[in-house]
Image (spheres, rainbow, N blue to C red):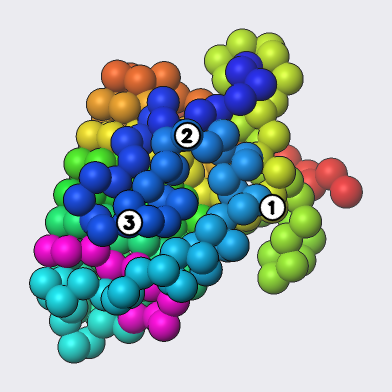
Amino acid sequence: MPDSIRIGDYVHSPAASGLEATGYAKIGEFDLSDFLTRWDALHDDALQVLPERIHPTARIHPTAIIGEDVIIGPGVRVHEFSTVRKRPVLGAGASVGFGCEVTHSFVGENTVLGHQVGIGHSVIGTGAHLSANLVIAAISLWNYDMRVPVKEIVLHGPGGEPPYRCMTSQFGGLIGDHVQTGSMITLGPGIAVGRHSAIAASVCMGNIIVPAASVVRSASPQVIVEPRRI
């Protein structure tokens, strides 16, 4: 397991979203845990320097709910009944489908979120396509009070190395450039998917690093139920 996960090894920094004067212009240079711990301040600083938080060429459906702290780039489309809130960034040309929720997430340029996609505290790369009914969860189920999460999110590699610590109790996923997914998928909390990977329908996984150019399928129909350890 690497001591560092560099965001730039997964996603490109925005090139056409008008973010040149903000910290988001160098998002690829951050270590993941460093970015997650500084994210709120970085976003608030960006709001102070941007001349407009919603680009005039963005097309937002009247039924969409848009928070006051959003950054929405040129050519973005937000469709019916979607919610975009709590310090999100939608890069140039991104498309948010019907009935989505984007919470505290960075969505890269020309990325498509299909219908009823929910993502929280996540970084999505350029040109990704996340199909309908996909969720990226951000909080571990093992918190005893989900409203006040305290359990740190960690990522595990394929070997027996120590886990990568994200230094936060809220992190969904780092989804690389040009990742494609099927439908009915649950990811996270805590996942990193390398560029040009594909995730087949019905996959459920979290706390894992997926190498670039991988294919992930669901191959285990078994369900295990056992007592909860307290």
- Say which residue label 1 marks: 169
Mark 3–mark 2 distance (CA, rounded to whole Å): 15 Å
The magenta region covers 66-75
Say which mark, if any, is on residue 29. 2
Q: Residue at x 26, y 58 (%)?
A: 18
Q: Residue at x 61, y 25 (%)?
A: 4
Assess whether mark 2 and mark 3 are in contact (beta carbons under 8 angstroms).
no
Q: Residue at x 62, y 53 (%)?
A: 38
Quarter of the image with the N terminus is top right
Instruction: Indicate which label's residue lies in the foreground, 3 or 1.
Output: 3
Q: 26 or 185: nearer the eye? A: 26
Q: 134 or 6: nearer the eye? A: 6
Rendering coords of residue 23 (x, y %): 46, 52
Label 2 is placed on what type of residue? Glu
Q: Secondary structure at mark 3?
A: loop
State which tag comes first along the sequence, 3 or 2. Answer: 3
Q: Secondary structure at mark 1?
A: loop
Mark 3–mark 1 distance (CA, rounded to whole Å): 27 Å
Rendering coords of residue 206 (x, y %): 53, 38
- Residue most toward the bottom? 62
Q: Residue at x 37, y 47 (%)?
A: 25
Q: 86 or 81: nearer the eye? A: 86
72 inside magenta stretch: yes
Label 1 is placed on what type of residue? Ser
Task: Please determine whether, in this image, residue 145 is positioned above or below residue 54.
Answer: above
Say which mark, if any, is on residue 18. none
Say which mark, if any, is on residue 19. 3
Label 3 is placed on what type of residue? Leu
